[in-house]
Amino acid sequence: MTDHNYFKIYKPYGYLSQFINHQNKRKSKKLLGELYDFSKNEGIMAIGRLDEKSEGLLLLTTDGKFSNYITSSKIEKEYHVMVDGIITPDIILELEKGIEISVEGKPYKTKPCKAIMLNDTSHIYERFVRDKRHGPMTWLSITLTEGKFRQVRKMTAKVGLPTLRLVRVRIGDYKLEKMKPAEVLSINY
C-alpha cells in the first residue's frame, strides 16, 4: 500500500493551479511550485483548478482516488465573491435557481446552488481591488456542487454583477479558515 500526501494551500491571486508550464506563451506565469518545495511529494497534483485571477483554498494530493472523490458532485465548493454593484434578494433567488451560461460555446444551465449575501468578510485576507469611488461593491457566498470553467464569474456577470474578486473558502469539510496567501498546510484524509 502506498502512502499518500495531502495538503491545503491558499493559492494567491496571480498564480496558475499547476506545477509545470508546458506552454510557450505562459513562460512568465507564476506556478504553485514557487510557493513551497513539493519535490519530496512525487506525483503531487492540484485537485481541481482556480484560475489565475482567483484565489483561495486549493487541495493538493498524490492520491488519484481522493482527487476523483473531491471533484465529484458529492462535494460542495464554497466561494466568497466580491461583485461590482449591489446584491438584491431577487438576484440571490436567480442565482440559486440556476443561470444559463456558456460552456465551450454552448448554452448550459447551472445546477441549483446556495447563495447568500455576506455582511462580514473579516475572515477573508484583504487585498486591494479598486477604490470605492468607482461604485459600490458587495460580497456574496455561492456554494456549488459542480465546477464548469469560470462558472462563478459567468454566473455573476449574467445577473449584471461582474466578479471583482473570487476566493474559494471551502471544499467539502476542508476550510480556508485564517490561512494567508501562499500558506501550505499538511492535512489528514
Image (cartoon, grey):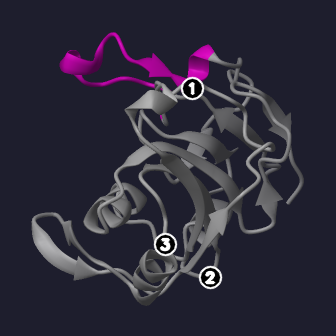
Q: Residue at x 84, y 36 (%)?
A: 185
Choose between 134 and 62: the one closer to the eye: 134
Q: Quadrant of the N terminus?
A: bottom right
Which residue carries the number 1 mark?
A: 32
Q: Is residue 116 left or right of residue 15?
A: right
Please tell me the numbered disc located at residue 74: 2
Mark 2–mark 3 contact, CB under 8 Å? no
Q: Is residue 65 left or right of residue 7?
A: left
Which residue carries the number 3 mark?
A: 88
Q: Is residue 93 above or below residue 124?
A: below
Residue extending furthest top? 28
SS for callout 1:
helix
Name the spot of residue 49 as percent of width and height, x first. 48, 48
Amino acid at circle 3: Thr
SS for callout 3:
loop
Choose between 43 and 113: the one closer to the eye: 113
Question: What's the magenta region?
Answer: 18-34
SS for callout 2:
loop
Mark 3–mark 1 contact, CB under 8 Å? no
